[in-house]
Image: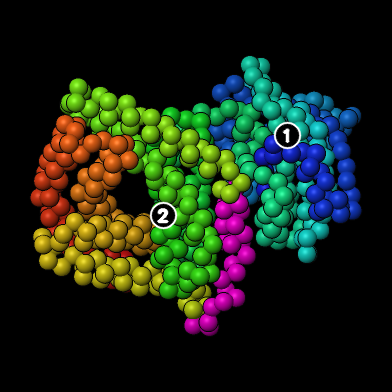
């Protein structure tokens, strides 16, 4: 068994000839070219896929190689999977050649193995270059071909950078070097995943699984990777799907990521990741425009004024469509891929340690729970101070309070696994939602201006009245939510929880 570590990048077929002339590739000590034909096996119900396993037989001339791979991780373009590979004599898998621990329990029954058959094939020409970057050995592979099933075919054009030895940091650095000359795009799907043609769906964040023995620094890295995974899990829905929840979840992932960077500001100053923050702000703002139009369009559908709002609805639909065109262009851009590669390199290299004083380095090495308790207490005190004389706060002050509560909510979810289960995050989320409704009217007013709606138009009067009614309805609930929050048990102060 070995662990495969590689980066996958899409390359436009028109760029291939230019790519092969890159100085890095021209300096390679060894270059090879071969025709690969792969058949992937599974049951008609895709039982192996559901077990997180990929099984293929590769034909290279007269040679036959069977490979079993786990699902692994695909974050920031980096794929890490366990794999078992051995040579066989036929075109179908020889299951006796795999260790028993490698095969999922489902394969233990002979009748289940009988269900396995060819599902799809990938045929491509692979050109490889063996490179050395500092102390790391990297194989660069250019694959050109297609993925074929019984009903469809997809073009295949990608670059794989596989780490043979050394540090994953060099994989990211080599990818960034290649991107300086070519518009490469991160490909998070493996060939197998593309062959299966998995249905589109959106993904929520899920729990951050921190362990009690983690240091503050290990927790930071784990949380950021978790946020990146949440972000990339929703890319396909935004690029190819129709559910507006995809954009919402990508935006949430970015806000969570940026919140984590903000939470760790006392230990890792912003200046150590200022370029990343700028790029994160760029993509967040593009997604934010689309999300604002999504929410506004949804609100318009719920309003009972069809004649008054018909023209406005048509205008908003056009602006919503334009916003999605901009989002998809951004996600397909080298700039977005470069941002993900920079994040991956940043987390793998941990360059921030070089610029920190001894006291902060020591704090990074302390238990994550110590840091969590301190930072949560600091946020709590800030919220309590901002919320003094709660009933007298104006719209701007309530908005600032909402932002602080949002950061606090993310923090409690990040560190929840370090404490006993509690309902604190739910109370914060409820308070955040109530404050958000008060802010919707301000956002809607800005969108109406962008839509070119005259301030004297009947639709403008109708909408102002509708949002005013919403705000008045929720003002009473907001006071109740605030008092409930203040009464909630402050879990991080109790050393026994």
Q: Looking at the picture, how far across and down is residue 123, in whole percent?
A: 76, 28
Q: Is residue 249 visible?
A: no
Q: Is residue 463 left or right of residue 57?
A: left
Residue identified by numbered label 1: 13
Q: Is residue 25 left or right of residue 393?
A: right
User: Which residue is located at x 24 percent, y 48 percent?
Assistant: 442
Q: Residue furthest top?
A: 151
Q: Earlier in the sequence, mark 1 or mark 2?
A: 1
**In the rendered view, would you say 13 is above or below 118?**
below
User: Which residue is located at x 58 percent, y 43 percent?
Assistant: 333
Q: Is residue 464 left or right of residue 246?
A: left
In magenta, the rendered stretch is 337-359
User: Which residue is located at x 22 percent, y 59 percent?
Assistant: 396
Q: Looking at the picture, how far across and down is residue 319, in whole percent?
A: 38, 34
| Secondary structure predominantly adopted by residues drawn in magenta | helix
Q: Is residue 256 visible?
A: yes
Q: Residue furthest bottom?
A: 358
How many C-alpha atoms fall within 10 Å of the one at disc 1: few (<14), some, or many (≥20)?
A: some
* Disc 1 from disc 2: Cα separation: 36 Å
Q: Quadrant of residue 311?
A: top left
User: Which residue is located at x 48 percent, y 64 percent?
Assistant: 220
Secondary structure under tag 1 reads: helix
Q: Nearer the viewer, mark 1 or mark 2?
A: 1
Residue identified by numbered label 2: 256
**In the rendered view, would you say 287 is above or below 60?**
below
Q: Looking at the picture, how far across and down is residue 54, in whole percent?
A: 65, 35
CB-based contact (under 8 Å), mark 1 and mark 2: no
Q: Is residue 269 left or right of residue 58?
A: left
């Amino acid at each position: 068994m070995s662990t495969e570590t590689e980066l996958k990048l899409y390359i436009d077929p028109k760029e291939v000839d230019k790519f092969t002339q890159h100085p890095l590739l021209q300096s390679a000590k060894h270059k090879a070219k071969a025709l690969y034909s792969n058949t992937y096996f599974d049951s008609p119900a895709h039982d192996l896929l559901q077990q997180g396993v990929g099984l293929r037989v590769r034909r290279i001339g007269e040679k036959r190689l069977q490979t079993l791979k786990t699902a692994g991780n695909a974050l920031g373009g980096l794929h890490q999977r366990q794999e078992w590979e051995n040579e066989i004599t036929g075109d179908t898998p020889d299951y006796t050649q795999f260790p028993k621990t490698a095969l999922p329990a489902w394969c233990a029954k002979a009748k289940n193995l009988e269900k396995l058959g060819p599902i799809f094939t990938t045929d491509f020409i692979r050109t490889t270059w063996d490179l050395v970057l500092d102390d790391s050995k990297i194989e660069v592979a250019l694959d050109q071909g297609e993925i074929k099933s019984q009903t469809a075919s997809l073009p295949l054009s990608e670059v794989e950078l596989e780490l043979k030895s050394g540090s994953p940091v060099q994989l990211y650095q080599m990818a960034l070097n290649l991107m300086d000359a070519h518009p490469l795009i991160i490909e998070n799907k493996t060939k197998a995943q593309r062959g299966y043609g998995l249905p589109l769906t959106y993904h929520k964040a899920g729990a951050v699984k921190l362990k009690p023995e983690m240091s503050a620094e290990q927790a930071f890295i784990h949380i950021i990777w978790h946020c990146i995974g949440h972000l990339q899990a929703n890319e396909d829905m935004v690029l190819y799907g129709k559910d507006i929840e995809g954009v919402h979840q990508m935006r949430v992932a970015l806000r969570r990521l940026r919140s984590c960077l903000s939470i760790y500001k006392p230990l890792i100053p912003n200046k150590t990741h200022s370029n990343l923050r700028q790029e994160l702000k760029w993509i967040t703002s593009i997604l934010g425009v689309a999300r604002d139009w999504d929410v506004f369009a949804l609100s318009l559908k719920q309003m009972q004024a069809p004649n008054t709002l018909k023209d406005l609805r048509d205008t908003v639909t056009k602006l919503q469509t334009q916003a999605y065109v901009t989002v998809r262009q951004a996600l397909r851009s080298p700039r977005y891929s470069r941002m993900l590669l920079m994040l991956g390199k940043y987390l793998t290299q941990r360059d921030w340690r070089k610029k920190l004083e001894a006291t902060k380095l020591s704090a990074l090495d302390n238990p994550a729970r110590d840091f969590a308790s301190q930072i949560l207490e600091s946020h709590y005190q800030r919220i309590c101070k901002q919320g003094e004389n709660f009933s007298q706060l104006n719209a701007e002050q309530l908005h600032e309070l909402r932002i602080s509560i949002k950061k606090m909510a993310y923090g409690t979810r990040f560190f929840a696994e370090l404490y006993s289960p509690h309902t604190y995050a739910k109370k914060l989320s409820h308070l955040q939602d109530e404050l958000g409704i008060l802010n919707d009217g301000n956002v809607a007013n800005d969108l109406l201006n962008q839509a070119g709606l005259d301030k004297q138009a009947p639709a403008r009067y109708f909408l102002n009245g509708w949002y005013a009614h919403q705000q008045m309805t929720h003002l009473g609930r907001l006071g109740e939510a605030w008092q409930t929050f203040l009464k909630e048990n402050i879990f991080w102060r109790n050393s026994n929880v």
